[in-house]
Image (tube, grey):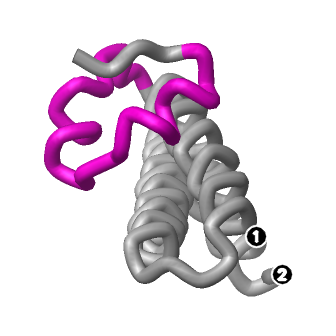
């Protein structure tokens, strides 16, 4: 990590705004990775819920995963979840556990 830090220090000395741009880029990339990981967790939990097995386990996992995913989305500015609920096929029973009402 010190190599990156040294490079950023050099960039800031030459062009201070470039250092900020590099950090902003890293933050955006981390947000995208985090959101992607949260979405994958939702997909896995919903698939587990559909396959059966320990239904209570998968329902709890799906609720926790969806809640985390919604939080991640809201942190980056996405306030509406209607489209991803439909796209990911999030069941009403999962949403009901979050206090949401399915349409």
Left or right, 57 with reference to 96 = right
- Image coords of residue 30 (percent x, y): 54, 59
User: What residue lies at 30% left-to-right and 17% top-to-bottom?
Assistant: 80
* Picture quadrant where residue 86 is located: top left
Badge 1 element: helix
Left or right, 99 with reference to 70 = right
User: What residue lies at 16% left-to-right and 33% top-to-bottom?
Assistant: 83
Residue 18 drawn above or below residue 70: below
- Image coords of residue 63 (percent x, y): 62, 45
- Marks 2 & 1, CB-CB < 8 Å contact: yes
Left or right, 84 with reference to 49 = left
Q: Disc 1 marks which residue? A: 5
**Could you give the CA–CA distance between mark 2 and mark 1, rounded to whole angstroms?**
5 Å
Q: Which mark is residue 38?
A: none
Q: Is residue 14 visible?
A: no
Q: What segment is highlighted magenta in the picture?
A: 77-99
Left or right, 30 with reference to 25 = right
User: What residue lies at 62% left-to-right and 30% top-to-bottom?
Assistant: 97
Query: How many discs mark residues in the rendered view?
Result: 2
């Amino acid at each position: 990590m010190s190599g990156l830090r040294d490079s950023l220090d050099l960039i800031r000395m030459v062009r201070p705004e470039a250092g900020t741009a590099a950090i902003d880029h890293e933050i955006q990339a981390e947000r995208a990775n985090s959101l992607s990981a949260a979405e994958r967790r939702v997909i896995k939990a919903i698939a587990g819920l559909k396959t059966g097995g320990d239904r209570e386990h998968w329902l709890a996992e799906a609720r926790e995963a969806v809640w985390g995913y919604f939080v991640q989305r809201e942190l980056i500015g996405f306030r509406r979840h209607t489209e991803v609920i439909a796209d990911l096929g999030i069941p009403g029973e999962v949403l009901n556990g979050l206090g949401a009402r399915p349409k």
